[in-house]
Image: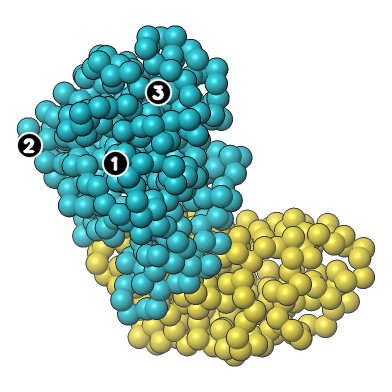
Chain colours: A cyan, B yellow
Amino acid sequence: MTPPTAPAAAFIGHQAAAADYLAFFASARGTDLPPLRADQVTSLLRRLDPMPICDLTLRSPTGAAVQARYIDAFLVVDEEWRLAAAVHRVQAACHEAARTGARLVTLGGFSSIVGESARFDPSREFGVPFTTGNTLTAAIIAEQVVGVAAGLARCQIAVVGAGGDVGSGVCRILHARGFRPTLVGRRLQPLATLAAELPGSAVKSWGEVAGQSDVVVLVTSAALGAIPLEDVTSSCAVLDAGHPPNANPDSHARYARSGRVLLACALETDLPALLQDYEGGELHACLAEGMALALEGRWEAYSVGRGRITPSRAAEILALAAGHGIRPGPVRFEHPKPYTPDRRAR
Amino acid sequence: MIAAADPRYPNVYRDVVAHSITGEAVGIEHYSRMIPLARSLDERLDLLEDAYHEKLHLLGMREVGRRLNVPEKTDIDGPYWRRVRHAFRERADAGDLLACYVMQDIVLETFAVVLYDAVLPGSDLFAAERIRVIAAEERDHLAHGIHALTDAYCQDPSGLQERVNYANERVARVLAEWIGPEECGPHCGVCHAECAKLDLHLLGVDMVTTQARFVGDYGAALRSIGFPAADVTRWLARLPG
């Protein structure tokens, strides 16, 4: 055991659902003790302050290496989540991250959505650059959509959550690649503004496009499983980039998780339980953006939210990430079992 | 939350007093056991002072009880404290001062600070004044323990890790179980009648929050000593339930 040194990078994240925390704690707890009950974990999570969970070492094929710390915000984004409580958690997680002395902090998953919703600027508040990881996320999703679309004769794409930071970025990138995505979201104003920016794109409701689309990209700030898939056709490809997943897949959808990268760079951790939910070598693109920036020695708030993702910035971060062996993850169409509170209990 | 003038207040608070007095009595015993193990005269004097502080805390809470006219009760041999004291005595008898510091200055002082902080907002002025002072001194003990064990960790990381393993299994898990939201299985011996957890909400105390605070603060103390976050996560994952 070696004494910890100040990490160069910090990552703020959270598990997708309470069931994933249950599995994580069961794994970290050891096999000699019975696992905690789901209700014990859920109630504890709602009161536990964010804390550092483990240390990571990133090694690029270029030879660059970075020490990092992972901080869990213990965000459970289900039907009971509340913005005010989530903001408190994200702020506390940012405080923990800043305390590590890291030169760059990445706001993974829902933590960036919470921060943006509360108009909270951690870079200014803590004097450390924070990146949301959204630019690489949008770039990776767009690459995955293009890959799926390449096999289709007709490709009508609907982006659900197009008014958000990642969603608008995906739409801009796809538009620049010649697609004309349909824009779906709750708030009409940002959708109308985006449609004016992207000629040929239309704003429609989910009810209008669900049965008409060949590819659906889910990138909303909705809680776990909030987007119904009953009306999509059996040939429609649903790419769910939500963390937590936006849809609770039913049996007929061609459903795949999206927004993940495949790492050729090494990611070592002293707590393997953290990565148990990922297929080998995969990781969420938001965290990968922070990894790529840190390996490159670019200590900057690359992605700051508020719909500023452009095709040129996306191309830049995609190339930068590729230079460190970080590439779009495979799109696996499968029929995963829906999330239930005890799905992953052991 | 009930007001101090509420006739239910003394009944609820009698268990707070009982638990405080009992915990402080255990603290006196532990520091007293550590004194013969001290490695220097200064350390011996420090431990003596720590024991004396615990005595003052006990007397302060006894005074709170008298003021509220509640009967005094204490039981350091109840099912929870017995396990904690037995674990401590085992290491003290073996001359393992470092393990004693981990158990008393880190685990038990964190526990004390968290519980005093939990009841403070619902306490009347007289009790609150004393509890605030006591909690501040327990915080000092905790800070002193972190400082001392940080040096010990630098000298022998794996040796200290073994001590935390022991303290986590034998003490921290007992305490985390004890302050869980569910009614105690065996009666702890300290509460006057039924489990105090049933009434603590009247003082604004939420046991799940208190348990989570203990888990969080205990983890923070261990990380402050220098333990890698992953080791601390594994220890914490073994706690509740």
Q: Which dot, 2 or 1, sits closer to the camera? A: 1
Which of the two discs, 3 and 2, labels the residue nearer the N terminus? 2
Question: Mark 3, chain letter?
Answer: A
Residue B2 position by quadrant? bottom right
Residue A339 in the image: above or below residue B24: above
User: Looking at the image, which residue is at 25% across and 44% down?
Assistant: A283
**Nearest-to-viewer mark from 3 and 2:** 3
Q: Looking at the picture, how far across and down is residue A341, in whole percent?
A: 47, 63
- Marks 2 and 1, Cα distance to the nearest angstrom? 39 Å
Q: CA distance from mark 3 to mark 1?
A: 18 Å
Q: Is residue A283 above or below residue B80?
A: above
Residue A14 falls left or right of residue A286? right
- One can see residue B231 in this view: yes
Please tell me how crowded label 3 is: few (under 14), some (14-19), or many (20+) other residues with Cα within 10 Å.
many
- Can marks 3 and 1 be said to lie on one chain? yes
Q: Residues within 10 Å of mark 1 (few under 14, many from 20)?
A: few
Quickly name the residue at label 3.
Answer: A182
Q: Earlier in the sequence, mark 2 or mark 1?
A: 2
Please name the residue that numbered disc 1 is placed on.
A235
Q: Which chain contains the residue that carries disc 1? A: A
